[in-house]
Amino acid sequence: MIVQAYLQERAADLKSKTCSIEKVIELSVSDFKHLRQAPLKDYDFISENKADLHYEQGIWQCLLILGTDCEDGILVDPEGFDFALFTAFLPSARRLLPPDMEIDRSYQKIAEPWRDERRDEMLRMTLHVDGRSDYTLVLPADEEYLDAVKAYLDIDVFADAMLSDIHFKVPYIGELICDTDCPAVEDYNDFAEALENIWQKDGMLLTYAAVLDAEKPETLHRAVELLQDLDNYQRIVEGPYEYGQQRLRELLGLDDEDIAELEDYMDFGRYGTDCMEHDGTIETEFGLLRRIEPPFTEWQGLRMK
C-alpha cells in the first residue's frame, strides 16, 4: 500500500489543530503542482478569499485546495496574507467531502505556464502566434511545461509559432552556433538539456567553446552531437613542458616519482612540443585543443604556433 504523507523528523509531538473547511477550490493540474512546489508565492485564489477566514473559538478556518483529477488536497490558512502561510497536506481529501459540498472551479482558467524554476536557464526565446501575446519560452523544460505552453498559445505544434530573440545564457556559446536549418523548439530544448548537464562541471564550458570554434558546426543538431561527445576532446591549459609530462603518464603509465627521476635526463618541453604536433593540437579562441579520435589534421585548423 502506497500513500502520500509529510513525515516529520524527531517530532516532539503529533498534536493536530481543529480546522473547518470554509471553501473548496479546485485548480488545474499545473496550478495545483505549482502550489505544492511554491506555497509561499502569492496566489489570487488566496488573496480573494482570505478575508472570509478567521480563527474562532479554537477553530482554524481554512481553504481546501484540490487539483483536477487528484484525490489529495492541501489545507491553507493564509492568516491574512496572499500566500499559504499555514498548510497541511490532506491525503484523499476529495473522498472526505460530503456530496453536497460546493467546489469552486472558477480559478481553472488557462494560466500562464509555470516552469520548474529549480532548473538552470540555458536559453530563452520569444514565441509569436497571431492573435496572442508574445510568450517568452525558457529552456530546458520538461514535456509537461512544453505542452502547457502549446495549450496557452492555442497551438498543436511549436511549428505554428514564429521563433525570435533567441538568447543563450552564455553569449559566446550562442555566437559560435550558426544554424541555417531553422531549428525547432524541440531541437533547442535538446541542446539546452545537454548544456545543463555540463553547466556545473569545472572547465567544461570553455572546452565546449573551443570545440565549437574548431569544428564549426553548421547545424544545432551537430552542435548537440559535439556537446555529447566532449570526452573525445582535451582543452590544454598547460604549456609544452607539462603536456610532455602528461603524455608520458598516459603512454607509459609513469607516475610522479618516475617523472621526477627523468627530470635531469629529458627535455620535457621539447618532447611536449613534439607531442602537440603529433597529436594534432590546434589553436582556438579558447585555448589549445586536442581531438583524441580521430586527431585533427593540419588542414582542419591553425596548427599550434
Image (cartoon, helix red, strand yellow):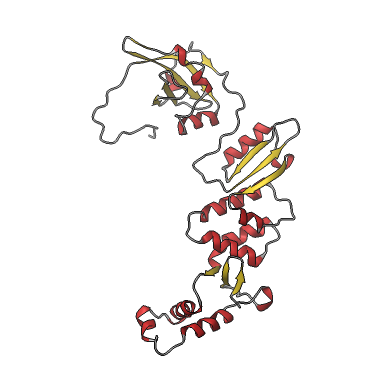
Position in image of residue 208 (x %, y %) = 57, 61
- Among all residues in the image, which is located at the extreme bottom? 265
Task: Give percent across and percent down for residue 186.
Answer: 65, 47
Image-quadrant location for residue 261: bottom left
Asked where in the image residue 64 lies, by quadrant, the reply is top left
Q: Residue at x 53, y 24 (%)?
A: 27
Image quadrant where one finds the C terminus: bottom right
Residue drawn at point x = 45 percent, y = 12 percent: 52
Q: Please give the name of the residue rendered at 36% of the width and 32% of the height, measured from the top-left corner.
A: 6
Q: Quadrant of the N terminus?
A: top left
Instruction: Please name whichever residue, 168 or 149, is drawn nearer the observer in this view of the structure.
Output: 168
Q: Position of residue 39 (x, y in %)?
A: 45, 29
Q: Is residue 178 left or right of residue 286?
A: right
Q: Quadrant of residue 285?
A: bottom right
- Determine whether, in the image, residue 73 is placed left or right of residue 10: right
Q: Nearer the viewer, residue 137 or 95?
A: 137
